Image: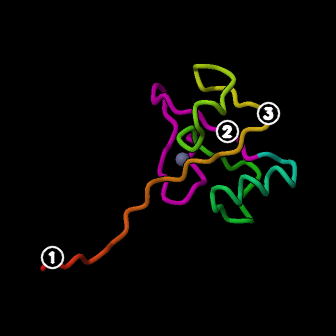
């Protein structure tokens, strides 16, 4: 099964060797709300939805391999959004 990231604007998928880990959104209601809020997720996001490791800072992990999050870790890195702006240079 291929995991995809629940964060809008992030199209990261997991595949062997990609170096990205995926983390289930917590089931605990309050904790889940923190993740939803931090990543601007759909409030009806499924229980099996995952957030990829791109949204966590290095210090959110217990291990260097970035496969184990600290219990209190909350994603904090939003994907870079490309804005369409018309710039007029005079
Ligand atoms: Zn992601």
* Count of marks, rendered view: 3
Start-end of magenta stretch = 1-25
Q: CA distance from mark 1 to mark 3?
A: 49 Å
Mark in the foreground, 2 or 3: 3
Which x, y percent locates residue 13?
Answer: 50, 43
Using the image as rendered, state which of residue 11 and residue 30 is in the foreground: 30
- Quadrant of the rendering where the C terminus is positioned: bottom left
Q: Residue at x 60, y 26 (%)?
A: 66
Q: Residue at x 78, y 38 (%)?
A: 72
Mark positioned earlier in the residue sequence (1 or 3): 3
Q: Does the segment drawn in magenta span residue 11?
A: yes
- Quadrant of the rendering where the N terminus is positioned: top right
48 relative to 31 in the view: left or right: left
Which x, y percent locates residue 40?
Answer: 63, 62
Secondary structure, magenta segment, majority class: loop
Q: Are marks 1 and 2 in contact (CB under 8 Å)?
A: no
Which residue lies under the disc numbered 1? 89
| Residue at the limit of the structure toward the top, as seen here | 64
């Amino acid at each position: 099964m291929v995991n995809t990231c629940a964060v809008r604007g992030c199209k990261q998928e997991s595949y062997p060797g990609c170096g990205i880990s995926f983390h289930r959104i917590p089931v605990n209601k309050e904790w889940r709300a923190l993740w939803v809020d931090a990543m601007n997720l759909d409030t009806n996001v499924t229980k099996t939805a995952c957030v990829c490791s791109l949204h966590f800072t290095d210090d959110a992990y217990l291990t260097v391999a970035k496969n184990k999050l600290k219990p209190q870790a909350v994603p904090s890195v939003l994907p870079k959004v490309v804005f369409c702006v018309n710039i007029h240079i005079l």
